[in-house]
Amino acid sequence: MQERPLIPAIPTPFPDETAGSFLIRLIKLNGHIHSSTFYRSKIDLKYKETLNSIITHDYLFLNLLKKFQLPHSLKELSLQRHSSTLRGCVIWKNKLSIPDYFFSNDVERFCPLCLKEIPYWRKIWLVKPYYACLKHQIRLHMTCPRCQSTLSSLRTEICICSKCLGDLRNCEIETVSDEQTKHIRWFLAFIETEEQEKFNLLKIFWSTLKKFSAHDPAPPSIELLLEITYLFFMDRDSSIERMVDWISKRSHQVHPRIQLVPFLIADTMYFGQYTKKILEQLPVPTELAPEHAFHLLTIQESCQILDICYSTIQRWIENNKLHYVVSKDIPKNRKFLSSRDIEYFLVQKALHPSPKKLKPPPRKDGQRLTITDVATKLNVHYENIRCLIRTRYLKADKLLVRFRWAYFINSKDLEEFNEKYILVGSLAKKLKVTPQNLTEKLASIDIHPISGPHIDGEFNNVFLQESVRHLSQEVIEKIVNYPTLTGRYPSFEEQLPKPLPTYLSLNEAAKKLHISPNKTARLVEKGFLEKDTSHNLSISISIQSLNILIANLHNTKFIYVKQALIRLNCSANWFHEYWVETGFIHVHDFLYWHFVERHELNKVLRLKKSYLTGTEASTLLGMHKSHVTNLESQGLIEPVYFGMPKIIKLFKREDVLKLKELGYGAIN
Ligand SMILES: [Zn+2]
Ligand SMILES: [Zn+2]
């Protein structure tokens, strides 16, 4: 009575094979002509993109394996992801968390010579900076060499393009230099041996370099990004030379300082000296770029470019020396400056340098405060203060104390800040109102922050003290109807830098989950919560991941496993063997909380009304638990088989009752 397995022949995977490669070979081996019909028999596959996402995500791929009853161990062929989101970070070789943009789609990029040797896809080909095969020292192909189209993950032959039917192995090869392979080797060693903190620096450099290249007509090649990154870490002087060349080529369109703005505003202290040295080697333009490429600059960017503080720009605007860009494409509560104006100021500064001011002697007055001190004083989060410093609202000095760089704030500067500005969080606490939607509420009575996610893409909502001084708790509480700002300008949103994700401290997250901070840290470690990997000073937890977890814990479709056991009247072991391993019930594991789905439990409860397990049937007959099995071997009762992958044997309740009537049970 054993059912035929869904897939009769399963190829043996190569240890370094990709999931996509394995599936193509599996489909071919089982004689399917169309892979899309093969997939659609079990999964809802609407687009090729869905399959591309599934095969490079261990969690999604495991689901696919389950649907096709394939061994779960094959999960290893896909990429391990940090979270269940489609493009979450990849956990490379159980160590580093690497952003998705370092990886390509599966079964696309290949070395033709490797394919000639053994035709299957190598996992290392998914790593984008691995743009050449180290074994054959030739460049990987990114498309079909014959028709140039991107290779489809839905093909049925590993080495044949499904569009033109050309053999991928027959193509021209391009050798790469020893220098180029050296860069690739370095990158591979880097991601296998370095710590997360050092990798984060590489990640920031890489993405900043990409932003820097935005003034180029075409996006930068992977090999160029890799080369400059390699030089940044291994040969800083050459890297500076390359950057100087790069900037010079574009300086007829964009001023060098404006070109360097991604590096000037990057939230890391490593780029300060780097950009300084680059600028020292470049001539200072004394006239406007002849083919000036106009673009919008935020106030923060402009401050960094001109090396002035926020209040100076503010004063220039008040005195009509500088104007915000007016355009119907810019929402009225967002402010931008023109690159042309900023460049004009740069040139003026070069033409009429202000007499060198003597550095004021270090102030003796005031106390030296750490970021944490200031956060406590202002009654806001650590992260808020870091951003205030980055955006230069709050002056801070970077000092080397006990071999570590740290920011310090002079208490006088903090007083100055407090006189002029207030953060939305501090304002809420001062007014004794909830901080949620306070910015939106104030906007409805025409009080707007001067900086914030909806103003200049910055993290903090900063208000001028004078604009909020008259407010009181009653005024805020009277505001009931107010529009929310989310999603108001969709088309424009996309062009602007995204506001930073918001994070919560470990302790705050623990409080929300009603568990200890230690336990919360374990949730982060196990990937149930995401932490901010951009800095390692303290664990902060992504609010989004916390909300997802809390939503799951309160999801009404779930019921605790413990409660399910009571309803099923069975032990944990028995529950596992009979209902979980057989696929009737799926356990949702959130480390400290285990749930099952209510509808699955109800299905089992309904089933149990008509069917009995061997033990239950024997008990009903008042006999030893093997009794029914004996009756079965005598042909007196027919079992019914259920479950996948494990099969269980059940007996119809009415059959058992009939046997009891016929006297096969104990006499009571
Ligand atoms: Zn090769
Ligand atoms: Zn082709």
Image: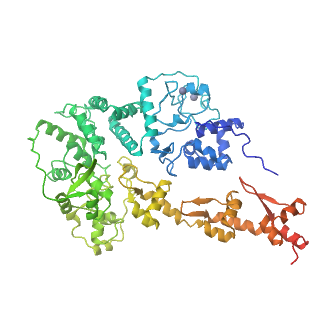
Residue 637 is at least partly visible in this image: no
In depth, the one of 34 and 608 nearer the eye is: 608
In the picture as drawn, the residue positioned furthest to the bottom comes out as 668
* Number of residue marks: 0
Q: Quadrant of the C terminus?
A: bottom right
The residue at the point 68 percent across, 35 percent down is 28
The residue at the point 30 percent across, 30 percent down is 246
Q: Is residue 121 above or below residue 88?
A: above
In depth, the one of 142 and 2 nearer the eye is: 2
Q: Is residue 367 above or below residue 662?
A: above
Residue 633: name its quadrant: bottom right
Residue 212 is at least partly visible in this image: yes
In the picture as drawn, the residue positioned furthest to the front comes out as 402
| x, y percent for residue 91 | 49, 45
- What colouring does the structure picture have? rainbow
Q: Is residue 71 above or below residue 287?
A: below
Q: Is residue 154 left or right of residue 212?
A: right
| x, y percent for residue 535 | 36, 50
| x, y percent for residue 462 | 27, 59
Q: Is residue 82 above or below residue 561?
A: above
Q: Is residue 668 left or right of residue 516?
A: right
| x, y percent for residue 112 | 56, 26
Quarter of the displayed picture in which ligand 2 can be seen: top right
The residue at the point 72 percent across, 54 percent down is 646
Q: Is residue 140 left or right of residue 646?
A: left
In depth, the one of 94 and 558 nearer the eye is: 94
